[in-house]
Image: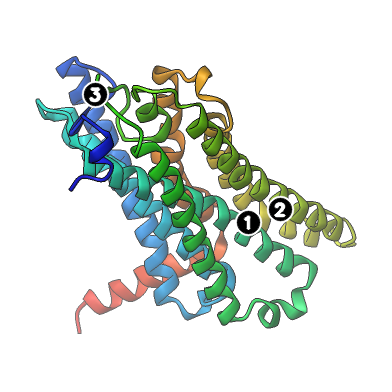
Amino acid sequence: MIPGQNQSWVSEFILLGFSSDPTTNSILFIVFLLIYLSSVLGNGLIIMLVCLDTQLHTPMYFFLCTLSLLDMTFATTTMPQMLVHLLAHSQTISFARCWLQMFVFGGLGITECAFFVVMAYDRYVAICYPLRYTVILNWDLCIQLAAGSWVCGFFSSLLNTFFTMNLPYCGPNRVNHYLCEGPSVRSLACMDTHFVEMVDLVLSVFLGVTPISLIVASYIRIAMAILKIKSSVGRCKAFSTCASHLTVVTLFYAPATYTYLRPDSSYSAEQDKKISLFYSAFTPLLNPVVYSLRNQDIKRAFLKVMYYGRCTSGPG
């Protein structure tokens, strides 16, 4: 039975995507295919390097590896379906698949919000307590923090998805989006959605403002610790280790905050589906670039793997 079928007359939705013009869709297909493949390859490369290089077996790179896994899964939740719909004549998605996509997409997004706090805490401990870094962030705590982020993300998404998909949808069923995202689907409900909007807003404020506040608090403490470093070289090195994290946090939080921390009354489908590309497509693409360009350890590990690969494939 389709979830919520006893309250809904719609058995499938039509995702309108970006354009109805075949030529435009063909161009978009090529662009998004390149973005998706680059995202998977970039994040997959970071995961492989962290797993293969024992010098990267530290809390910081364990968290970076987990972030790459999140980004790769995040992109895979939406982009393959979007690519198919760009070339297919039918853009339909069943009620059950829409429910599942909304749940997984929301779960991964909220998990990433929580995980950025974990990564900020990692930088806080590394800079403020460098001598006790591996003692405080032992492997048991690292695994617990990562697992806690996943549990928090998917449990929160389950609540949000349950309220949204149990609304009555009696038509129309045309979703002006390229994926089943809460606000875009909820706008089609044939009843007053004020209560669900309020629940969604409360969850979004708690799951958005709380992580941002904790990240800001961590970096205030980090900045105070860095300013106490007498060596200018030491200060620059400390700031550099935080710059990558602050960059990816900004790239993710800015568009996500705009989309979710506002009432549905100001919802604009055309604007929102373009903004959502930043955290569903571009952030997974840019995160590996940001971390690899600013991280000497990742570059060294990559060159080491390339060197060993060349040696093993060379003449015996």
Q: Is residue 299 visible?
A: no
Question: In the rendering, at what x and y percent does residue 210 appear?
Answer: 67, 48
Position of residue 74 in the picture relative to residue 112 (left or right): left
Q: Is residue 309 above or below residue 197?
A: below
Return the residue nearer the eye: 115 or 312.
Answer: 115
Query: How is the protein colored in the picture?
Result: rainbow
- Evaluate if marks 1 and 3 touch, with contact meaning CB atoms under 8 Å apart: no
Q: Nearer the viewer, mark 1 or mark 3?
A: 3
Q: Secondary structure at mark 2?
A: helix
Question: In the rendering, at what x and y percent does residue 108 appear?
Answer: 43, 51
Q: Which residue is mark 2?
A: 214
- Evaluate if marks 1 and 2 touch, with contact meaning CB atoms under 8 Å apart: yes
Q: Is residue 244 above or below residue 150?
A: above
- Looking at the rendered structure, the kind of residue marked 1 is Val
Q: CA distance from mark 2 to mark 3?
A: 40 Å
Return the residue nearer the eye: 299 or 186.
Answer: 186
Q: Secondary structure at mark 1?
A: helix
Residue, x 29% and y 47% (percent of image)? 100
Return the residue nearer the eye: 192 or 304.
Answer: 192
Position of residue 164 in the picture relative to residue 92 (left or right): right
In terms of image quadrants, where is residue 24? top left
Q: Which residue is mark 3?
A: 173
- Looking at the rendered structure, the kind of residue marked 2 is Leu
In terms of image quadrants, where is residue 308? bottom left
Q: Secondary structure at mark 3?
A: loop
Earlier in the chain: of badge 2 and badge 3, it is 3
Earlier in the chain: of badge 1 and badge 3, it is 1
- Evaluate if marks 2 and 3 touch, with contact meaning CB atoms under 8 Å apart: no
Q: Nearer the viewer, mark 2 or mark 3?
A: 3
Q: Which residue is mark 1?
A: 117
Question: In the rendering, at what x and y percent does residue 93 appear?
Answer: 19, 35
